[in-house]
Structures are given as structure tokens and as C-alpha cells.
Amino acid sequence: MGIARCRDGRVVLRRHLGRFGLRFSDAGPIHGLSAKGEELEPLNADSEAMRILERTIMRIAPTSLPILLVGESGTGKTHLAQRIHQLSSRRDRPMVKAICSGLTPKAIDMQFGGSGRRGTDELSRGGTLFLKEISELDSATQRSLLYALPETDGLPETETGGPRLISSTTVDLEQEVNAGQFRGDLYYRLRGTCLR
């Protein structure tokens, strides 16, 4: 399922990374390069949980897996999305941030290439699309977004030409799906790996 959960202060990645030969290890230095080849500062790793989170990000950033970031307001989800983008192979392409509370089906069609259109120049270059507070989409906009997203073959190493998806939310989307408040098919498309 590819869900990362916090248990006793540790982030645990299950199944999805191992399925593609990616391994999680607590050993080794934490470092990365920016688009300009400059050394990136690591996350503020004052705790073991933050060091583990940083290593997890270092391992999933180079893949094309969609990522769902779940956490309370003010916990740094936007910073994590930027960090993942900076550490990815897409770092020299744009990262586009969309605030989901203001999106409508028409805006999705115009901005993200719904209904078979190509989308904006920024997104067609294959950067990163960060969908902030994905849970705030109404059902009509969820449907439009689902059909605007590029089809993927499910392999994390494959770039589809479209943007890499990173979404954030403050609510448990799985509970929202079970309650009928969020589309299950969209949820499964967005949560290749989930960091809580």
C-alpha cells in the first residue's frame, strides 16, 4: 500500500518501496544537491524521527511516485514538498503550487489540461504539481482533477512527461473515502507513498 506512518516517533515505510527495490536504512549521511548543484541543508534533524523522515525523503524523491503528505496545519508539509522537488530529477523544472480550496472544475480544465487538452506550459514540462489541502476539493472538482491527471504505469522510476504529484492534507483521506466525502479512485491515484 505504500503508507508511511509514525509509530513511537519513527516513520515506517511499508511494501511500496520494497516492491521496487528501494530500501530504507537508518545508516549513512543525509545530504542532497539543489538544481544548481549546491549542497542542500538537511531538515532540522533534532530528533530521531526527523532524521528518519529526511532519509525517507532522500530515498523517495528520485522516484516518480505520487506522494501524499498528511499532518496538522503548521507542520511543514509545504516545506517537505519543496524539499522533495529539490531532491528529485525534476528539480530544474517548475514546481507549481495549487491551493485546492480555490479550484473549480473549470479552473482544473484550463490549468491542468482536463478534457484532453495539454495544460499550461509549466506543467507540460514535467515539473512537480503540489496540490495543497487536497481534501478541500468538492466532488465535481475531484472528478475533473481525476480525469486531468496523466495516466501512469505505476513504476516509480518512469517519468510520464507530466508533472509529479505531491498532495497535502490535514485530514485522514482514507476516512473521508470511507465516509463518501472523497473519491476513492482519486485517493488511490494520489497516495503512491503517504508520509504522516
Image (cartoon, helix red, strand yellow):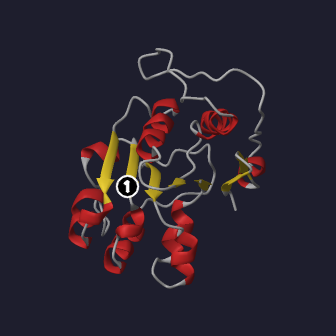
Q: Give the residue pinned by disc 1.
A: 132
Instruction: Tell me: 26 left or right of 56.
Output: right
The residue at 46%/14% (across/down) is 38
Q: Is residue 144 above or below residue 94?
A: below
Q: Residue furthest bottom?
A: 180
Q: Locate the C terminus by quadrant.
A: bottom right
Taking 77 as reference, is 143 above or below it? below
Where residue 125 sits in the image (x, y, percent)?
A: 35, 41
Along the viewing direction, whichever of 174 and 50 lies nearer the viewer: 50
Query: What residue type is disc 1 on?
Result: Lys
**Could you tell me how many numbered marks the image carries?**
1
Q: Residue 137 falls in which quadrant of the image?
A: bottom left
| Residue 169 point in image, percent of width and height | 45, 60
Give the secondary structure at mark 1: strand
For this view, does 24 lie left or right of residue 34?
right
x 54%, y 68%: residue: 172
